[in-house]
Every structure is written in C-alpha cells, then in structure tokens.
Image (spheres, rainbow, N blue to C red):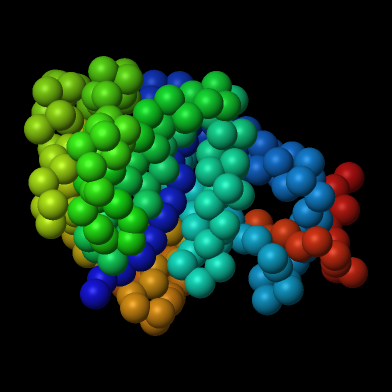
C-alpha cells in the first residue's frame, strides 16, 4: 500500500553543528557499548547499523532498528532518548505512506508525540486514543524556523482519517527546517532503509543521483559478538 521508513533528527539550531555531529557520533558509540554491542567493520555481520548525516540545522541519523522487517521500537526510541542528552531529538516514523508519527525527546524523556493515525494505517479507535497523540505545538516552539508559528504546526497536524500523511510530513519539515522536502527522493523520505511493501533499499541507494553528498555520511555497525571489533586507541 505504501512505503515505510523512520529516522532520527538531532537539533543543532544555532550551536556549532560540526561540534555537535562529533558529539553525536561519540554518544552513539557510548550508547551501543553500554547496551553490550561491539563496533565492527563488516555491515553484513552487524546486528545494528546507523548512519550519521552531515552537520546542519538538524543532523540526520538513520537507524536499522527502525526498519520494517527487523523493527525494534524500544531500541530505536532508546537511542533517541540517549541522544537527547546533547540536544532535542525528533523521530519520524512513517507506515505505508498513510500513518506518520513525530516524537520529541528532551533530556532523555519523550515529551511529545503527534500521530495522524494508528499504526500501521488505521483510524483511531476512539477520541481518547487520538487525543493521546494530538501533539502540543508549544513544546516544539524553539525548533521552528524563523517566521513559523505554532499555529502553523497545529494546522498541519490534522488527525482526519485518511488525511495525507506525506503532506503532513512535508509541511512539518518546512516548519521545523528538517529539509525542504519537495524533492523525492531525499533524506526526508528514508531512514537507514526505505521499504516499499517489502522491497527495501538502503539510504545511499535511495538518494543516489540526487544532490545528497554521500561522502559527508558516516556509517557505524555493531554486533553482539565480533572477531573484527574496532579497538579505539
């Protein structure tokens, strides 16, 4: 019926984005070390992989734990929580191009969530369920681009059943400055993987032949057991 993808975004805002990117990479390594995973060189042997995009207003982090066939949402959101020690973190989770949810983490806590439908692509069973993920734009105020208003975010975040999830994502991306979002394919539409009805491709293949400079990305791979572990000096 549609595509699935998910990603993390770490907010640099007006701080030194290059410095934050270095800190994000270091924090990712610490996170996996603390949960008992070893960094390895071989992606094919990895049980978890992430990719870190270039420095910018938001730093893109793709995460294989958010991939449909092997999704581990506790692990996926656990990384977001940990990274939010450094700066606010938002997660994008899209299901079947029909249900999109945005999550906001600050100081290791999930502080807000918006969703237009129940996963994978269902209408909310009750008003109470819908209200739980209606989202509070005021909690996102400091993340908005210049001249954007919280009322704009409120207008974009409709929960009308079968509303256009892709349009919600594009409008939200403009308001928060994730990226322009008009071009497809782009990083807005993928995580570590993009999966269309079980036909998955990796982010680098998804954005091939676009303006995305893959030389600015760094991949990290982790496994429970590894003979080819990277030993940091």
The quadrant holding residue 225 is bottom right
Q: Residue at x 78, y 54 (%)?
A: 37
In the displayed structure image, the side of residue 8 where residue 209 appears, left or right:
left
Q: Residue at x 55, y 22 (%)?
A: 107
| Number of numbered markers | 0
Q: Residue at x 12, y 23 (%)?
A: 151
Across and down, in percent, residue 125 comes to 25, 48
In this rendering, does residue 26 appear at all? yes
In the displayed structure image, the side of residue 97 where residue 42 appears, left or right:
right
Across and down, in percent, residue 118 comes to 30, 52
Q: Is residue 230 above or below residue 25?
A: below
Quarter of the N terminus within the rendering: bottom left
Across and down, in percent, residue 42 comes to 73, 71
In the displayed structure image, the side of residue 74 where residue 105 appears, left or right:
left
Q: Nearer the viewer, residue 60 or 159?
A: 159
Q: Is residue 64 above or below residue 30?
A: below
The quadrant holding residue 199 is bottom left
Quarter of the C terminus within the rendering: top right
Q: Residue at x 69, y 65 (%)?
A: 47
In this rendering, does residue 88 appear at all? no
Q: Is residue 87 above or below residue 165?
A: above
Across and down, in percent, residue 161 comes to 13, 52
Q: Nearer the viewer, residue 75 or 143?
A: 75
């Amino acid at each position: 019926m549609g595509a699935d993808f998910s990603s993390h975004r770490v907010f640099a805002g007006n701080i030194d984005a290059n410095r934050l990117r270095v800190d994000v990479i270091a924090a990712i390594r610490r996170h996996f070390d603390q949960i008992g995973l070893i960094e390895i060189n071989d992606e094919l042997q990895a049980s978890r992989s992430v990719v870190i995009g270039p420095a910018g207003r938001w730093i893109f982090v793709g995460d294989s734990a958010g991939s449909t066939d092997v999704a581990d949402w506790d692990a996926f959101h656990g990384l977001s929580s940990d990274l939010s020690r450094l700066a606010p973190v938002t997660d994008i989770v899209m299901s079947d191009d029909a249900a999109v949810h945005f999550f906001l983490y600050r100081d290791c806590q999930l502080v807000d969530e918006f969703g237009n439908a129940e996963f994978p692509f269902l209408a909310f069973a009750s008003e109470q369920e819908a209200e739980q993920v209606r989202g509070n734009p005021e909690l996102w105020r400091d993340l908005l681009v210049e001249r954007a208003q919280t009322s704009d975010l409120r207008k974009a975040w409709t929960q009308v059943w079968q509303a256009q999830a892709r349009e919600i994502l594009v409008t939200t991306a403009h308001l928060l400055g994730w990226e322009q979002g008009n071009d497809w394919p782009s990083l807005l539409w993928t995580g570590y993987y993009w999966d269309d009805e079980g036909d998955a491709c990796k982010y680098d293949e998804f954005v091939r032949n676009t303006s995305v400079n893959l030389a600015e990305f760094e991949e990290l791979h982790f496994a429970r057991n590894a003979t080819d572990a990277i030993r940091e000096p």
